[in-house]
Image (cartoon, helix red, strand yellow):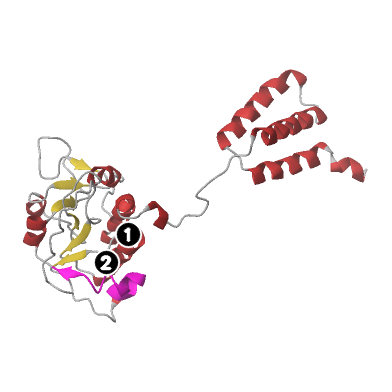
Amino acid sequence: MTDDPRASSPETGDEHPRNPPAVAVVDAQTPGNVGTIARAMKNFGFSELLLVDPPELDPDGEAYGFAGHAREDVLPNAREVSFDHLVENYHTVGTTAITNEDDQHHVRFPFTTPAELADRLERVEADTVVVFGREGVGLTNEELARLDEVCSIPASAEYPVLNLGQAATITLYELRTIALDPGDVQLPDVERVRADEPSLERLYDQWAALLEEINHPEEKRAKTMRMLRRLHGRADPTVQEVTTLLGVLRRATERPDREEN
């Protein structure tokens, strides 16, 4: 880790932040949580990790063990800074599980959810840092009072407190849209192609043939066909799905059990 202060980015005239938000962890007690956060940063496109009063991060210890591929860059490049440095150099977003409930209290209110925060930060041009607190008590009221805004993850009122690593992972996942270019996201089945209308009409014809073959009550067939159309219409089946359904329905219409008798 290095404690060199972060250099200010030059003005470029861009509409978006110069870099994805930095991530700061204040007074983490467990090296493993620091490693987990570094890994989540690597997953979702974040690279700048700032540590306030961190535990010792032994390259052979659990921080590096939990970091996955982030042990190669995010974790070794983490910088130790003061809380004052965060407040003085960044637009700061404090995270908390416990929020005040109304506008009569201004330490933990108003607050946004991580998904709402992602949309907001798209329009913030200043260097930004998302600040996570301690495993047990999070950020104190005194610390939160010095930060620019508050973010909280919606959770069960019965037990809203998340593990530090979990909270950071959820938050960074929601903020991924401002850290990752769409072309850099690995997703299976990115495009789902709906079957064309002639294929769907053949499917409906086959359903109608099956209803006739099984002597479905004639007075109910129109209503049943309308229901099947609506069902498939909402499902947006692919060509392969329609082809498979057609095969099954044809086989059922042919009544293979009759061939055995």
203 relative to 165, above or below? above
Query: In the rendered view of the protein, which quadrant contains the N terminus?
Result: bottom left
Image location of residue 117, percent across then percent down: 25, 45
**What's the amino acid at mark 2?**
Asn
Task: Name the secondary structure under disc 1.
Answer: loop
Q: Evaluate if marks 2 and 1 touch, with contact meaning CB atoms under 8 Å apart.
A: no
Farthest top residue in view: 219
Name the quadrant containing residue 35.
bottom left
Quick one: quadrant of the C terminus? top right
For badge 1, the amino acid type reads: Gly
Within 10 angstroms of label 2, few (less than 14), some, or many (20 or more) residues? many
- The spot of residue 73 in percent (x, y) is 29, 72
Write down the residue under mark 2: 33
Q: Is residue 67 magenta?
A: yes
Q: Is residue 88 left or right of residue 74?
A: left
Residue at left offset 17%, top offset 38%? 101
Residue 142 position in % (x across, y down): 6, 53
Is 61 situated above or below 222?
A: below
Left or right of residue 223: residue 157: left
- Range drawn in magenta: 63-80
Residue 204, image quadrant: top right
Asked if residue 170 lies in the magenta stretch, the reply is no
User: How many labels, in total?
Assistant: 2
- Can you tell which of label 2 and label 1 is closer to the viewer? 1
Calculate the distance from the C-alpha at mark 2 to the C-alpha at mark 1: 18 Å
Sequence-first tag of 2 and 1: 2
Where does the image place residue 43, in percent across and percent down from the top left? 36, 61
The reply, left or right, for residue 215 in relation to residue 88 is right
Along the viewing direction, whichever of 2 and 17 lies nearer the viewer: 17
Q: Residue at x 12, y 47 (%)?
A: 148
Q: Which residue is mark 1?
A: 45
- Is residue 150 rendered to the left or right of residue 61? left
